Image: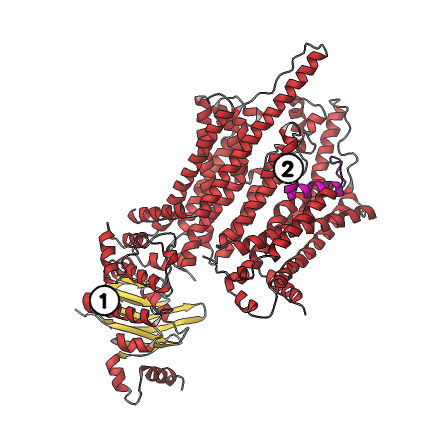
Amino acid sequence: MNNTFVIFRKELLDVRRNKFLLLLLTFTLLAVLVSILVSALDFRVKIYAYNKYVSALHSAGSTTVPAPPQLFPLQLLRGSIEYLEILGALFSIVLGYGMIAKEKQKATLGLIFTRPIGRYQFAAGKILALAWTWFLAVLTIFAVVTAVVAIIGNSPLHAIDLYRLLITAGLSWIYLLLWSALAMGLASYTRELGISLVASIVLWLSVVLILPQIGDTMDPDNQVPGGLFNSLQISKKNEVAVLANFAGFDKVRNGIEVSSITKHYERSTFAYLGIKDKFNQKPVSFAFSGTLPNLLSLIFGFFGVILFAILITTRKRLLRR
Amino acid sequence: MENVAIRATGLAKAYGEKQALHPLDLTINSGEIFGLLGHNGAGKTTTVNLLTTLLEPSAGSLEVAGFDGSRQASDLRRAIGYLPENVQFYDNLSTMENLHFFARLSGIVKPESRIREVLKYLNFTGHDNERLGSFSKGMRQRVGIAQAILHQPKVLFLDEPTSGLDPVGVRELRDVIVSLNRDLGMTIFMNTHLLAEVSKTCTSIGVLRQGQLVYHDTLNSTLLSFPSEESLEEIYLQIDTAKTT
Amino acid sequence: MSIVLIAARQEIKSLRREKLAQALLIVFVGMVSLSSFIGWLTKKNVTAIWQKVKYQGLTTAPNPFANVPDLYYLRNTVIYLVLIGALLAIVLGVASILRDRKAHTADLILTRPIDSRSYLLGKLMGIGLWLTTILGFVTLISWMSIALIIGKALAFGDSLHLVAFFAMSLIFLLGFVLLGMICALYSSRETNALLLPISLWSIITFVLPQLGTADHPVSLLNPVPAIANQGGAFSILNSVFSPLSTTEQFKKASSSILGNPDFIGSPTVGITVLALALMVGTFVLLTSKRDRLRRTLDE
């Protein structure tokens, strides 16, 4: 236990001094903020267009008052979550890979493993450091996000909104730590560092970008700008009834999507934040029951990867030639 | 009880079909400064890696400082210090921070005063808070030795310790090795190419050739056994070539 | 043989051993091969949905895919070029420079009577030739898969458009090769050399378009563009940021060349932006100081 803490402390010191890593995390934060600001601006433009439309209606003598667009502050976070999905995962890989790469490149493994260090203490210390680093990063990001959303929404967030944000932050921590642990495990597993970097980047590309993109592309509603069923002027109720006849295709499409851990993260967080209309303004328990399979997949995936990283990052593996 | 610091019995290492080290029988007594000589690829680093438990042997057994390599590995590691060839550290951390880390891993609680003591002994003060990224080779080597002796090991393993050092650095290192042996009674196992240094530092030598120990004796006996040779270099060349005929 | 050609030949030989490039290449060719099939499957499904709703009297709108051009099936290929192709190009560029820096072979090269600019140009050319071969192969696969789907050979005009599309893709990808090479020349660490251009790629692909259209990052990977917000400040933001996003320009120009009915416009602006990016990148590369190639990496 003691050596675990020694390694943990040293890693934190290293991370604090790693300027490039700090730059990457700052970049992620900026991307997240830009997304919120752009979404807020988008809403403003819609409000402006709406007011102009109502004004034009009144000038034409109409008494109809169409429903105004509504701002749900947490929905502004859609793009931000997507940046965490894509960029956050990539930078997580960098952090996790770097944990082992620097030891192999500097040959400090010889200095460490000629000391009396327990079988899993090295891995545990590294994983703890990754966990703490991501905890601080996620805390910072979501603290800033909460403040910005409150300011933009022009009203304080309610306790329930803060609760939703807390849940989302927790899920983000799980997602980011998962990728770091995976990259760390792969760097330990392979003899050559280059191969683990290849594997990590290809996995990132496939799981984070390609699989969700295929699923998205195969969604019939995404085939026409503005939505297929909108363009055919079909109501939501009828849309659901029609799609029930194409369950086979949707099963395949959905199957492709849920083979990606990123999709589980996305579906869970979108539900808690009310980004999808189905979950908007619904209780947290509704989001929970609606996305329980996604949550379970994320959690099982997380523990599976952590276990892999700990079991594979041993003296025998790391020192083998 | 025997005063044996290192005992290897049939110690061997193979990588697939390639035999990096043929079964090695080697005994080094406490208090010796042993120099292991050999050409590039002879198996010197493999031998050190086996004795420091960085590698698992394919055959045979080893005992260092009285601890069995397979059953008492943890105790063995507490009793040894190791300086690899071209030692590297965490460039983002300072001297003190690097040494603090390695000292803690060796089981030293609150090692700050011990670190200062060792750095003073090695005549390397005034660099505690400097980051190692800016250090020269000689400076790194000092820090390397410091981390190897912080926990007062009984046996010190040095892999090509003079590699890349200038003549002043080589002499300073020699003085350190001799004083560690003399003042602290440390047994020293050293891989090296520099025969001139071996003749000034070591009390016994061994010669490895293509993974086999072809010679082992005290330095004095060696010099006496080859009276016609003028230098250790000539003795070594004779030993090295003798086995090929 | 000129230095440029010697360097190009050496580059092509080395590329065959780059593991990450090989892995990305496999993913790229695999996805492009699948892309026509995915397009066909989706079109079949949407047509079936339309037929169902029409039969049930729920709509009188025409089938949105009634008259899609044959090159419609390449829509996903555009996205895979933006995603996988651009990353592959970055990796090739980074690997090309890091190879010399890590092995310190620059010392052996630059102590010979050669112009470092010719050497770098040769590397770029080598990568360009390699990419041309890959894109040629991918053009053939695309042509064959579309012919299989529509049940006949592509018309001559469509075939020319197909070739034009992949020729433009080469210009697009070379821009990212240059990005990779420049980042690798100026980075002090190996990991940074790869991460920096990937971060820049993400800015170009996601952040800049989002600034101009309010589109979310994931929706930018859909071959069917969302209805962009063009009102208010976005019309200004779009005109400022859109030209800087080579990926958006590539997508628009591709839509035009491939005859996408959702896009009205000429590919000229897009191709001009891509060509400009290529020229600027080449200029930056060739004006780099000679000793950049010799600088030791920190890791």
For residue B187, above or below residue A97: below
Q: Quadrant of the C terminus of chain A?
A: bottom left
Give the crowd class for mark 1: few <14, some 14-19, many >=20 residues within 10 Å.
some
Q: Secondary structure at mark 1?
A: helix
Residue A184 location in percent, x, y? 44, 49
Whether labels 1 and 2 share one chain? no
Query: From mark 1 to mark 2, how far is it between C-alphas?
Result: 70 Å
Q: Is residue A271 left or right of residue C175?
A: left
Give the crowd class for mark 2: few <14, some 14-19, many >=20 residues within 10 Å.
some
User: Which is more toward the observer, A12 or A176?
Assistant: A12
| Residue behind mark 2 | C240
- The majority secondary structure of the magenta stretch comes to helix
Q: Is residue C142 left or right of residue C90?
A: right
Name the chain under label 1: B
Residue A182 location in percent, x, y? 47, 47
| Residue behind mark 1 | B180
Q: Amino acid at mark 1?
A: Leu
Magenta stretch in the rendered image: C238-267
Q: Amino acid at mark 2?
A: Val
